[in-house]
């Protein structure tokens, strides 16, 4: 009988695979209760390290041309499509009965298909959203006046429990399309799809540190997400109590907060709007004298 070797999942931070700084793990079981692997339980220090990695990658990613960002996202969609069957299997792995109750009738295969489509959708917006969000402004002086967008900065993401892959990507994609680096906390109940996503990111053309994926308990990391001064925006799925904690902490460090309710339907076209990108940009107005 062949010896079964269980996989050792690791988080993806700064372009490298890491274990938790604390060494703590949580067992992940399949629906039948069989042990699958140990998932790292990241700490506040892991989160701070991920923010540092994002800060190093942020300027380079923001300086990429919109066309280049689009091509990188298209390639990521191709990689996910090539591993669609494996990713769908990962979505079915869970020991939590709530995952089964929350799972959409459309199933894991439909979630993978929708995730691929969502990546392609935002890849298409990467070199077009500026025309929608920017403008040329009429002014009563001899100047050209332009409003252009700039990335807001490092963005924190708290993924949902329902649609753990599609929901995660729906929160991450608007931020990175705008040129921001991201630090994301995966679903607690179904973290394995995020582990696979990290493996794809590691072999994609996306620079290391642009997307950093952590796993662990939300209650341990949410306060740091809320108060970390180098996180300039948060996109989160949160219940009312978590939302209040995020907004209170964000007010102290003056960061943007975009909250989605836990029962959000991630399959709707509402999550494909260029105005989702606007949440992670700042408007800069430029004046230029005519004839200068």
Image (cartoon, rainbow, N blue to C red):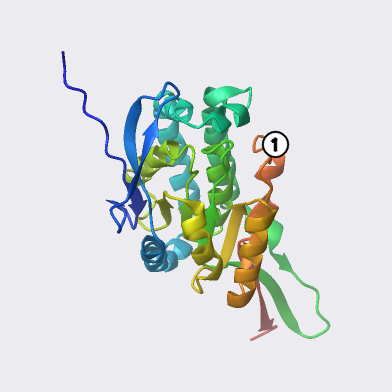
Quarter of the figure that contains the C terminus = bottom right
Q: Is residue 179 visible?
A: no
Looking at the rendered image, the quarter that the N terminus falls into is top left
| Residue 112 horizontal side relative to residue 141, left or right | left
Q: Nearer the viewer, residue 60 or 154?
A: 154
Q: SS class of the residue under badge 1? A: loop
Q: Position of residue 183 (x, y in %)?
A: 46, 57
* Vertical side of 38 occupied by 52: above or below: below
| Residue 252 visible (yes or no) | yes
Q: Quadrant of residue 76?
A: top left
Q: Residue at x 65, y 69 (%)?
A: 248
Q: Does residue 45 sit above or below 105 in this rendering?
A: below
Percent coordinates x, y for residue 270 in the rendering: 71, 43
Residue 269 image point, x, y percent: 70, 38
Query: In the rendered image, which quarter is residue 259 located in?
Result: bottom right
Q: Residue furthest top?
A: 1
Pick whichever, 42 or 108, lies toward us. 42
Dot 1 corresponds to which residue? Answer: 268
- Kindly identify the residue that appears in the image at 72 percent across and 76 percent down: 145
Q: Quadrant of residue 53?
A: bottom left
Q: Position of residue 195 (x, y in %)?
A: 38, 41
Assess disc 1: are there few (<14), some (14-19) or many (≥20) residues with their C-alpha within 10 Å of its C-alpha.
few
């Amino acid at each position: 009988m062949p010896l079964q070797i269980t996989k050792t999942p690791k988080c993806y931070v700064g372009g490298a695979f890491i274990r938790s700084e604390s060494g703590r793990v949580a067992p992940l079981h399949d629906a039948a209760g069989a042990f699958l692997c140990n998932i790292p339980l990241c700490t506040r220090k892991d989160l701070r390290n991920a923010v540092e990695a994002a800060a190093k990658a942020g300027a380079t990613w923001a300086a990429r041309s919109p066309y280049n960002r689009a091509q990188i996202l298209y390639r990521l969609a191709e990689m996910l499509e090539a591993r669609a069957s494996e990713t769908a299997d990962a979505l079915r792995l869970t020991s939590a009965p709530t995952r089964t109750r929350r799972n959409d009738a459309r199933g894991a295969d439909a979630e993978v298909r929708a995730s691929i489509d969502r990546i392609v959708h935002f890849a298409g917006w990467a070199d077009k959203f500026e025309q929608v969000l920017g403008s040329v402004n009429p002014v009563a002086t001899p100047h050209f006046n332009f409003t252009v967008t700039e990335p807001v900065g490092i963005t924190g993401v708290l993924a949902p429990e329902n649609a753990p892959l599609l929901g995660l990507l729906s929160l991450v994609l608007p931020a990175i399309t705008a040129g921001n680096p991201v630090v994301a906390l995966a679903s607690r109940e179904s973290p394995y799809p995020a582990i696979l996503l990290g493996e794809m990111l590691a072999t994609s053309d996306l620079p290391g540190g642009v997307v950093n994926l952590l796993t662990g308990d939300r209650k341990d990391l949410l306060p740091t997400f809320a108060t970390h001064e180098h996180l300039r925006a948060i996109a989160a799925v949160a219940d009312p109590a978590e939302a209040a904690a995020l907004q209170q902490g964000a007010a102290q460090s003056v960061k943007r907060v975009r909250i989605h309710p836990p029962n959000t339907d991630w399959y709707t076209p509402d999550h494909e709007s260029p105005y989702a990108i606007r949440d992670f940009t700042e408007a800069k107005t430029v004046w230029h004298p005519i004839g200068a």
